[in-house]
Image (cartoon, rainbow, N blue to C red):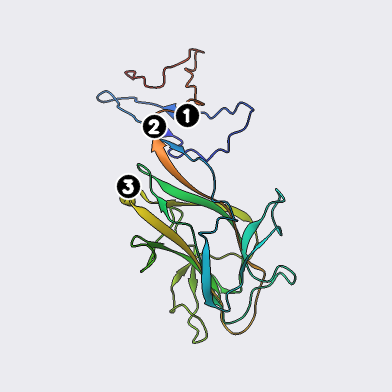
Amino acid sequence: SVTPTLLPIAQLSTATTNIALTVANLAGPDLTWTAHLANATAPFAPTNSQWHHSGTNDAWCLTTNRNWQGESLWYCGNPLTRTYPVSSHATLDTPPFTVGPGGGLYFRHWLQLEHDSGHHYWDGAILRLSTDGGLTFNLITPLSGYPAQITANPASPFPPDHPSLADTAGNWELVVVDLRDHSGHEVILRFEFGSDAYVVEEGWYLTDITPFSYAESAPWLTPYHPRGRTLPAIWSATC
């Protein structure tokens, strides 16, 4: 057994960070276990000229609202009133990027959308991916899935029960998109927002939009044995 099965994403700093990992084999044949490390260089700069946004009542813009670091981030709404427009169906496309070995993309977002009941929302947000230079985009599901669905509404740009990212609490969350099936290919990720013709909330903020890839080892990682020994970057043991 391996505990935990998935380690959290850690933002590196000059301070030492310790993450505990337990690998156990209580019976049976020898256990072979491999760890994959995701290396991310830097997020897309908000000022990158290859960002593209468009659509009906397109309100995508840069703002420093809701950013604890004081830097610009993407927001679909009016930064002065902190509300998104009604009858909006607006998209924001990342600059094109080549997916690295076993790679993907992660971002942080803050959502506050009009809620209906249960898991259903009147307004929503989804992700799409293009593999043909932006000619076509297909729905893609993040690793954590879509927690909500769109309520049937003729004023909505989404069909009834369409999966959606949605929240009413307005908390910063990390979202990871698995793109390993597209390794070596150039892609564009699309953030798509839609609202109906009635009630509005604060909207959708995006920051730290960062491609990553996997590597066998990293110069900043030092494995330690519980008894205090330093382990090499590639090592094996029989449990």
Q: Residues within 10 Å of mark 3 (few under 14, many from 20)?
A: some
Disc 1 marks a residue whose amino acid type is: Leu
Question: Who's the residue at 49% across and 17% down the image?
Answer: 226
Disc 3 marks a residue whose amino acid type is: Gly
The secondary element bearing badge 1 is classed as loop
Screen quadrant of the C terminus:
top left
Q: Nearer the viewer, mark 1 or mark 2?
A: 2
How many marks overall? 3
Would you name the residue on which mark 1 appears? 21
Residue 13 higher or lower than 237, as above or below: below
Does any portion of residue 196 appear in the rendered image?
yes
Upstream in sequence: badge 2 or badge 3? 2
Q: Are marks 1 and 2 in contact (CB under 8 Å)?
A: yes
Disc 2 marks a residue whose amino acid type is: Ala
Question: Who's the residue at 74% across and 72% down the image?
Answer: 81
Q: Which mark is residue 35?
A: 2
Give percent across and percent down for residue 170. 65, 61
Question: Who's the residue at 55% across and 38% down the image?
Answer: 10
Upstream in sequence: badge 1 or badge 3? 1
Q: Are marks 2 and 3 in contact (CB under 8 Å)?
A: no
Q: CA distance from mark 1 to mark 3?
A: 31 Å
Give percent across and percent down for residue 222. 49, 22
Give percent across and percent down for residue 124. 53, 71
Q: Residues within 10 Å of mark 1 (few under 14, many from 20)?
A: few
Q: Nearer the viewer, mark 1 or mark 3?
A: 3
For residue 18, which quarter of the picture? top right
The secondary element bearing badge 3 is classed as loop
Would you name the residue on which mark 3 appears? 184
- Horizontal side of residue 37 vs 111, given as left or right: left
Along the line of sight, the residue nearer the viewer: 91 or 165: 91
Question: Who's the residue at 75% across and 70% down the image?
Answer: 80
Give percent across and percent down for residue 168. 63, 66
